[in-house]
């Protein structure tokens, strides 16, 4: 199923090929609930092995329009991970110190060490999206930055970082629905930012900028995944499956104890063979 | 119940007054299970309000002997928090850059901003514990550092940071049991560090150093809590209750929408009164 949402080369990148309302043939959340919980437990075990082995790091990068559910997917899919080996990093408008550096500086500091999983809530891709839509940078600068991104991602993956890039795909109608929902709920209205309404005017420019991002930066070593996100439960299901299947491919295992530890295991008589049945 | 485990002034600081096997009168995990889940949900709601209001930050600091369960309590009690507003910070042996700075430098960088919760897995208290036990610093230097700690904690609390300091209290027999457990489980043996066995020799020196820490740094604004930790389920229960009751005292509420947002709420007709019943 996952290959339906994966982009690895320069073809079929139009977002119009992807349906934000897609639910992969499932009718409702109830149909996938058991499998979801099963996958959550599996992910927990794999995280433990990842942390123990320290052979790889995992960076899950989320992009998407306002209200596409970046916060929600991190909360729903990743909040069961052991926080000692997982963290979420949100990138808002850059500070003056961050702006005074190259565009990869602030995110590079936050990439996971081996053994760790990090989720990026927005990322360095904002520097070829919002900036381009609002004319802060021109097309040639955007192309240069995307080349730097390819090199940067190649370097990360060469260093054992598994990179999972996810675009949460929603329709403009769905976004408006979500904005109304925020405005009508006293416990959610604090999330509303009046500029979100303003950004809606630029919807098609954002689509253009995203499609160029997919054309320029969807690679074999760091593919993009276009995840349907109108139906939140299906979004969570696909994202969990994506992360799980990527981790499974790493073929992780617990490290073998060293000689000193093996000796202690014997001294403490804890590695005695089980009693023989007569 | 919580007051049984709280230290705020210079009396009754001997750890011998506290029973590591204490379960507060409960016979088993099953007795508190429902309340535990109820408290978890409450904590989730309070975290959301904390994040929305940005009036305070929360720093939960864990100290304790090896195998006292610092990792476990963070995983069991705090992994349900929304990772966008929560992170765990583990402090291992300092790097050369960290050692070249004052002892509060590396932890100060990691304190939570307002709106956020951070758990410290070990902390600046190591700099008056392990260092003192192994003679890297002398008593007068330890006293000076603890004075700096009081001042630092006063400054943090003045700035709206709620500081919850927790000592996980186990018995030496229990520690040995846990070490044996690690050594006999192929999926846990990677957690075993041969130096843990060596450190056991210094048990009573550690107790002395901890008792001095409690005498010098248990204050009204930043009390210590001695949490019985032999029974993991009771440890989790007390820690969750502690964090919850501290957050409840903050009297958090969602921020009111500003004028611009209130206008939009009307324009979008989302704040219509419910239809009158005839």
Image: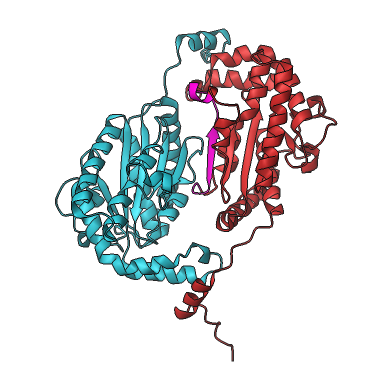
Chain colours: A cyan, B red
Q: Magenta stretch?
A: B83-98
Q: In screen coordinates, is A125 left or right of A261?
A: left
Which residue appears at 40% of the width and 35% of the height?
A: A112
Q: As displayed, is residue B2 above or below residue A253? A: below
Q: As displayed, is residue B206 above or below residue B70? A: above
In depth, the one of A259 and B208 nearer the eye is B208
Q: In screen coordinates, is A9 left or right of A63?
A: left
Q: Residue furthest left?
A: A11
Q: For residue B91, what is the image quadrant?
A: top right
How far from the left and from the top, in percent, is residue B256?
58, 67
- Residue A160 on the magenta segment: no
Q: In screen coordinates, is B59 left or right of A18?
A: right
Which residue appears at 81% of the width and 25% of the height?
A: B14
How far from the left and from the top, in percent, is residue A182?
48, 67
- Residue B85 on the magenta segment: yes
Which residue appears at 37% of the width and 41% of the height?
A: A107
Q: For residue B215, what is the image quadrant?
A: top right
């Amino acid at each position: 199923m996952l290959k339906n949402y994966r982009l690895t080369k320069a073809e079929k990148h139009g977002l119009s090929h992807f349906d934000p309302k897609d639910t992969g043939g499932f009718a409702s959340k109830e149909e996938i609930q058991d499998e979801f919980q099963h996958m959550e437990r599996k992910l927990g075990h794999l995280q433990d092995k990842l942390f123990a082995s320290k052979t790889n790091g995992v960076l899950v990068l989320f992009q998407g329009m306002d209200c596409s559910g970046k916060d929600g997917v991190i909360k729903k899919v990743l909040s069961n991970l052991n926080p000692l080996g997982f963290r979420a990093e949100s990138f808002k408008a850059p500070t003056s110190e961050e702006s005074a550096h190259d565009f990869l500086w602030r995110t590079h500091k936050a990439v996971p060490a081996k053994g760790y999983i990090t989720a990026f809530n927005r990322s360095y891709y904002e520097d070829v999206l919002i900036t381009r839509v609002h004319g802060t940078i021109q097309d040639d600068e955007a192309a240069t930055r995307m080349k730097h991104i390819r090199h940067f991602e190649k370097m990360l993956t060469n260093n054992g970082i598994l990179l999972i890039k996810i675009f949460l795909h929603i329709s403009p109608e769905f976004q408006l629905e979500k904005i109304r929902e925020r405005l009508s709920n006293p416990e959610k209205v604090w999330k509303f930012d009046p500029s979100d309404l303003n950004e809606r005017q630029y919807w098609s420019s954002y689509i253009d900028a995203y499609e160029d991002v997919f054309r320029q930066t969807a690679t074999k070593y760091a593919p993009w995944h276009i995840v349907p996100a109108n139906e939140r439960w299906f979004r969570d299901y696909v994202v969990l499956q994506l992360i799980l299947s990527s981790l499974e491919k790493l073929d992780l295992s617990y490290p073998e104890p060293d000689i000193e530890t093996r000796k202690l295991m014997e001294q403490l008589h804890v590695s005695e063979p089980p009693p023989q049945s007569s």
